[in-house]
Amino acid sequence: MSVAATFTGHGHAHDHIHPEPTGFVRKYLFSLDAKVIGIQYMLTGFLFFIISGLLAEVIRVQLLVPKGALLSNDAYNGVYSLHGSGMVWMVIIPLMTGGFGNYVMPLMIGARDVAFPWLNLIAFWMFPIAGVILFSSFLIGAPDAGWTEYPPISVQGPPGTTLWCVAIFLIGISSTLTGINFMVTIVKMRAPGMTFTRMPLFIWAQFATAALNMIATTALAAALLALFLERVFSIPFYDPARGGSPLLWQHMFWFYSHPAVYIMILPAFGIVSEIYPTFARKPIFGYKMIAFSSVAIALLGFMVWAHHMFTSGMAPWLQLPFMILTMVIAVPTGIKIFSWLATLWGGKIWFTSAMLFSLGFIATFTFGGVTGIFLSAVPVDLHEHGTYFVVAHIHYVLYGGSILGLFAGIYYWWPKMTGRMMNDRLGHWHFWLTFIAFNVTFMPMHWLGLLGMPRRVATYDPQFQFFNDVASIASFVLAGSTLLLIYNMLWSFRYGPKAGPNPWGARTLEWQISSPPPYYNFKTIPAVLKNPYNFGEPLPYIGLESMAGEDGHGPDPHAPVPVHA
Amino acid sequence: MAEASVPRRQGLGPWFWTVTSAMTVLNIAVGIFIVWFPIRILLPEAADPAGQIDDLFKFMSVVGNAIFTYVTGYLIYFSIVWRRRAADGPDAIGIQIHDNPKLETWWTVIPVILVAIIAVFSVRIWMELQNSLGDVLTMEAVGQQFKYEFRYPKLKESVYNEMHVPVGTPVTLHVTSIDVIHSFWVPEVRLKADMVPGLVQTLRFTPEVIGKYPIICTEFCGTNHSTMRATLYIDSQKDFGTWLAARFKEQGQGGGTIVLAQGVADDGRVLFGQKCSTCHSLGPFAQKIVGPGLGNLAHDPDHADLVTGKPPTPQNVEDILVNGYSGPIGVMPNRHANALSNSDISNLVAYLLSLHGK
């Protein structure tokens, strides 16, 4: 206990515990508690996930027949643009950082909250506002130029494009604030003894993501501001006839949006990196290399943006460094995948729903990574760019990567967040339906693109109908499979068995306190002796008062303190 | 704690080398199939770089297939062999190893080598795409909502939505746009370039297989983006000659003259950005880039006359655009070298004479 006693002095500033607010508004709507804000992010993000997902189904209904089954060209263009914008900015990014980051990160590093709770509250409320602005653009003419909104067409686009600018600008500010908040929290508020190399890998992933959010999002904000000014005040940033450059947007946009790909995938890497050791009952293999590769990916992510622009027009010699640096990213990504496989080797693998989604993630993400290498090679990209091959690739990394990672995270931390178990058998059904329907939906899109189907079209050539129909029908199953998740959540609230503090036998800090955790997370801040992944050893925490009381509010604070759970 | 219950290392596990060998055999078999498979039966290779691009695609497919097979193979195999069995208690744990520097070095070095090989192969094909092909047909494609305009150096008027090229003659195609970003893609040629307003990009290919191929827009360009198509005709030399002769004849009879009165200054402004602004500024005469500044063309106190010594009437400006200029000021190419159609010339004249300098 002497070690803990030494550390208590350092933790003094954080030891002041505010009383929990009791009114509904202060407790649930405008709470300063990162856990409540995290759940607010998740509920809002899940709502937008359903809206954006339904838009995807409208796309697939439209493409059932070559002439287009449902919508006019203009209506269709609005639907796919908001599907993409919604999924990227209103679903994946906020859920990865604001959702899981807020809920899990402070618990995992042994903190009572994030560094700036008020900033957190402000950042959250920008999110639903941005989402409402984005989707209300349907009322006045939705943006039609896809989630990338390349000018000059986006300058001429429907009135809703201006709302799109405002909404994305707002969510961009929200992301930047969250990035700053998380960066400070992770650097300054880790429990004593939790050195950088003792941080759980989810924290490393959030750390790299926070850096990307802080730095890259500013470029997007500048580009959006310019687009807004050109649309509203006719200031020619992008109009070539008046001295502007259409490619300026593309450089600024991708300088953000390529790192944004990693903002969307690094936290998923972090989630599965927690799940593999827990359910294989093994230390994560190659801890340092996985942590290092997250940082390497984040750094390299800033140097490859123009690989989205090989056909857009740039000095030809410039294509080479962008091509080669893009291929280099395959190396740290490969290191992660091999390390995860090695974590499974020699394990005692427990196939929970969270583990199944994490295992499926390896297969689909690897496939998306491989097609990414195809696209990085300039000569091959000259054929594949702007086709359904790219649509297939982006869905393999964003659905097969980020969304499967999010599902894994939901199943994993649900008992922690609600105190109740989900139905594991139903979770298995959810996984297999999702996994199979996902692959049948998106695999044929590779062939469609290679054989000549461009993206962002409301009608297509008759010879492509078969694969489009396969994709559409599978996508209906994919949408249906999500109902199983929703049902499972409702089931869990009503019938789910009590979870207890640590139903998975996991070793990170958040599992050592009650489920759901009390308002103040930790009664005393524990000291950390090692990284958390050594199964079969005592837990590496000292001074952790067990909060494992059945009422969820912790035991008598004067009771003796157990050293190991 | 029960130290004794921690399992010891026990080799790589049952069937490890059998599974590895099976995946290797599968990869070799699939690799051979990929290399053998003639992609052109699915999508013709109609012009020169298509075959090389397909070779690179095949090479990446072989490597990609191997990576994917090993990863998913081990994933499934480990999941089966190392699953928690009924006999294991809930406290059973896996083999507690943290790393293996030798293994980690290998799985860093091998991908680095693979990436290096892929990069070298890609750069080689890329370099061949940059090569100039010598004696060529040079022409232009201009995108606009929602059609393609093709300009041949010897034709006075543009041709819309059909592009004819003779088989065997290398083509250098300059692409640009007059409104928003479009794209020029012929899947059977495997090449694509975005058509960006204010920017000219170049595609080079040598047509090889006579036939009719779609030209497809792949950058969203507005309401009718989905149906923005044109047709590429790869003709025999003879058919191409016949087609071109027919266009000459048609244009000789019809609108073969330049009608200055029809010039639209706004269209001329866009054209100026594409065709003239590399050499001419919109400043005063003295503000040279290559040629003189044209901002005061009709109202310049220091240069009341044009470089030809004639007064700045529409006809005299037209004369320079049509015939070019060669003299003490420099050299400007004629309309054929600049690929200016009759309407282009009247639009440019209208625009240039509408300028009032700065």
Image (cartoon, grey):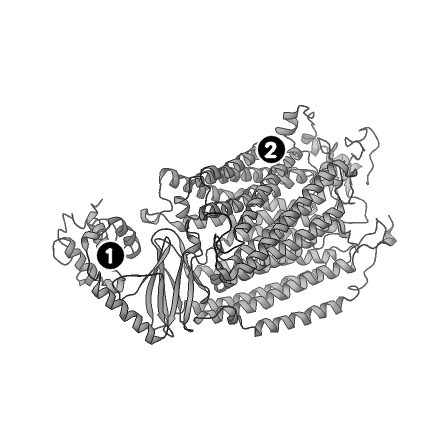
- At label 2, the amino acid type is Phe
Which residue occupies the extreme top position in the image?
A23
- At label 1, the amino acid type is Ser
Q: Which residue is mark 2?
A: A116
Residue B51 in view (yes/no) = yes
Q: Is residue A205 left or right of residue A464?
A: right
Q: CA distance from mark 1 to mark 2?
A: 64 Å
Residue B316 location in percent, x, y?
A: 15, 56
* Subunit under mark 2: A
Q: Main secondary structure of the magenta part?
A: loop
A20, above or below A140, in the image: above
Q: Residue at x 35, y 68 (%)?
A: B164
Q: Is residue B75 left or right of residue B119?
A: right
Q: Mark 2 and mark 1 in contact (Cβ < 8 Å)?
A: no
Magenta span of residues: A557-562
Residue B203 location in percent, x, y?
A: 39, 64
Mark 2 burial class by Cα count in 10 Å: few <14, some 14-19, many 20+ = some
